[in-house]
């Protein structure tokens, strides 16, 4: 009786061992299969991302080149427009600077400040007109009219600058004249003192200095 129980127990243990080995083999095989599937999917995803990443810069480069080629090439009218606008704003800045310097020196400026403000507003309008006319395909009456307005404002700015410079010069002229006169008198007195010192026998120093 006992031997029969032992035999059955041994058979049960052997069956359990075989079932465990089979289950372990199945688990290992399933893990390897799952690993291969995940690796293949990851590789496929990586290739797709790489292709997309390479396509985006290429498309951006093509779009950038198309935009660059779509820009208008500078022609003679474009260069003339840029020169007119630069000359206009240079004249406006020079006039404003001259008026500011005259004011700092204490010179009377009258209505030059308000004229500078009006000049800047008019220059802004003229600048827009010149810019719009410069984008035209061919020079016409509108372009000539805008350029003539800019030229008139350049002349007005020059007049304001000359007036400010004259006012500043009239203020500083008396001080300059007084300084020049004092320098001449001092040079004359020093020269006379040196001459007397040189003609006096036994004199070794200048006037006012101890021998």
Image (cartoon, grey):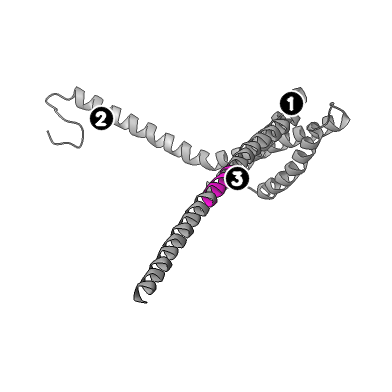
Circles 2 and 1: CB atoms closer than 8 Å: no
Residue at 52%, 54% (x, y): give it: 30
> Which image quadrant is residue 187 in?
top left
Say which quadrant the C terminus sits in.
top left
Q: Earlier in the sequence, mark 2 or mark 1?
A: 1
How far apart are labels 3 and 1 at the CA level? 45 Å
Nearer to the camera, 38 or 199: 38
The disc at residue 193 is 2
Q: Is residue 106 visible?
A: no
Residue at image location 29% in from the left, 31% down from the top: 190
Instruction: State the SS at label 1.
Output: loop
Which quarter of the rendering shows the N terminus? Answer: bottom left
In the picture, the disc for residue 73 is 1
Query: Is residue 119 found left or right of 145 in the rendered image?
Result: left
* Position in image of residue 141 (x %, y %): 88, 30
Percent of width and height locating residue 87: 68, 32
Most foreground residue, 162 or 155? 155
Q: Earlier in the sequence, mark 3 or mark 2?
A: 3
Give the alpha-carbon distance from disc 3 to disc 2, as whole Å.
Answer: 103 Å
Give the residues drawn in magenta, as a range. Answer: 34-46
Q: Whole-percent x and y of residue 79?
A: 72, 26
Give the quadrant of residue 140.
top right
Q: Which class describes the residues within 10 Å of circle 2: few (<14), some (14-19), or many (20+)?
A: some
Q: Secondary structure at mark 3?
A: helix
Question: What is the residue that sits farthest to the front in this orientation?
Answer: 1
**Of 158 and 5, which appears nearest the observer?**
5
* Callout 3 touching callout 1 (CB < 8 Å): no
Q: Which residue is mark 3?
A: 45
Instruction: Tell me the element at label 2.
Output: helix
């Amino acid at each position: 009786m006992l031997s029969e129980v032992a035999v059955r127990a041994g058979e049960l243990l052997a069956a359990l061992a075989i079932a465990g080995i089979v289950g372990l083999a199945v688990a290992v095989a399933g893990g390897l299969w799952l690993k291969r599937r995940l690796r293949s999917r990851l590789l496929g995803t990586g290739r797709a991302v790489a292709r997309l990443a390479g396509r985006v810069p290429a498309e951006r480069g093509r779009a950038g080149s198309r935009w660059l080629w779509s820009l208008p090439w500078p022609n003679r009218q474009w260069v003339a427009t840029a020169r007119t606008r630069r000359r206009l704003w240079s004249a406006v800045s020079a006039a404003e600077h001259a008026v500011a310097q005259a004011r700092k020196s204490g010179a009377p400026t009258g209505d030059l400040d308000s004229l500078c403000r009006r000049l800047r507003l008019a220059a802004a309008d003229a600048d827009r007109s010149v810019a719009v006319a410069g984008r035209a395909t061919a020079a016409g009456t509108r372009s000539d009219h805008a350029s003539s307005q800019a030229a008139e404002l350049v002349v007005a700015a020059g007049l304001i600058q000359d007036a400010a410079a004259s006012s500043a010069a009239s203020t500083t002229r008396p001080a300059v004249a007084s300084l020049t006169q004092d320098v001449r008198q001092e040079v004359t007195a020093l020269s006379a003192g040196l001459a007397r010192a040189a003609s006096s026998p036994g004199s070794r120093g200048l006037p006012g200095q101890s021998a």
